[in-house]
Amino acid sequence: MSVLVYTENWDGKFKKLSYELVSYASGVAKMLNSSVTALSIGKVEEAELKRLGDYGAARILSVDNEILASLDNQTYANVIAEVAGKENASVIIISNNNTGKAVAPRLSVKLKAGVGSGVSRLPLSVNPFTLYKRTYSGNAFAHVIIKSDVKILTIAQNSFDLIETANNAAVEKINVSVDNSQVKTKVQNIQKQTGKILLTDADIVVSGGRGMKSPDNWSTLVELASALGGATACSRPVSDEGWRPHEEHTGQTGKIIAPNLYIAVGISGATQHLAGISSSKYIVAINTDKDAPIFESAQYGIVGDAMKVLPKLVSAVKEFKK
């Protein structure tokens, strides 16, 4: 019995998220005294595939089929289920991103497998199979026991450190049965954002709320994000007011992110906002109100006027990077 990990690629390249999944899978495999098989769907060069072995994959399976060039939830679930059956996989690991959230439920039904979603640590036990996950916007945690023969875990981004290993894993090209008539998703056009770091990829995010007072005051916040090599974000009221584009909105009704560092500037910390950023490794809050809820979730806080604090932070970062 093995641990199967589905490693998503973006235009033929893996991101840090994919290596996190393989590292996590390696940890689970050690607990089960098993091995890790990594599955890649789509066109990925062999050199890129072999990098998965550097994070613990003993075998790397590549499914390259033109029909699978674009994500189709049903078809991808069928492919993963077929490979899992052939590999006799007892644990299947997927990211807890939009792809994972779409594929995992279908996969669960096909394999009659229990799902542990948004898992952020290695299992507490494998007998019974007990998972740890955060709940209620990170304000509580739960222990989830999965009793099914096959378990599906979706892993929260940035919740597990990369573990590099010297493993020269072989790449195996495999064929799976793909019914073209079942593919319901057709991509008509692709528009890519350029010149900015995507929120979901950023290790550092600088986010502003209504405490920024006006859209005219955003230049210093953007300058800080640029100096740190990070992305910019905002709370929902800011995007609703049209101060910032909606794609920057983080929170329960916006983007769910988990950067290494989240700097919240002038954000009070409503429950809906915290639901989208509570998995960040470190939260720094800047607010004039010392009783703002955001300080309860932040590791570091600055009580002060953002218009005075931000310029000093920008100067300090630039001085440090000289």
Image (cartoon, helix red, strand yellow):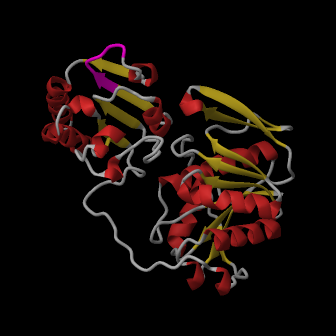
Of 163 and 271, nearer the camera is 271
Give the residue drawn at x 43%, y 80%.
188
The answer to whether residue 231 of the structure is visible from this angle is no
Residue 221: x, y in percent? 21, 38
Residue 300: x, y in percent? 37, 21
Give the residue drawn at x 46%, y 35%.
272
Membership of 100 in magenta stretch? no
Above or below 256: residue 62: below
Residue 137: x, y in percent? 54, 32
On the picture, is 17 further left or further right than 178? Answer: left
Above or below 251: residue 39: below
Give the residue drawn at x 19%, y 24%.
309
Magenta residue span:
285-291
The answer to whether residue 48 of the structure is visible from this angle is yes
* Residue sticking out furthest to the front: 241
Q: Quadrant of the N terminus?
A: bottom right
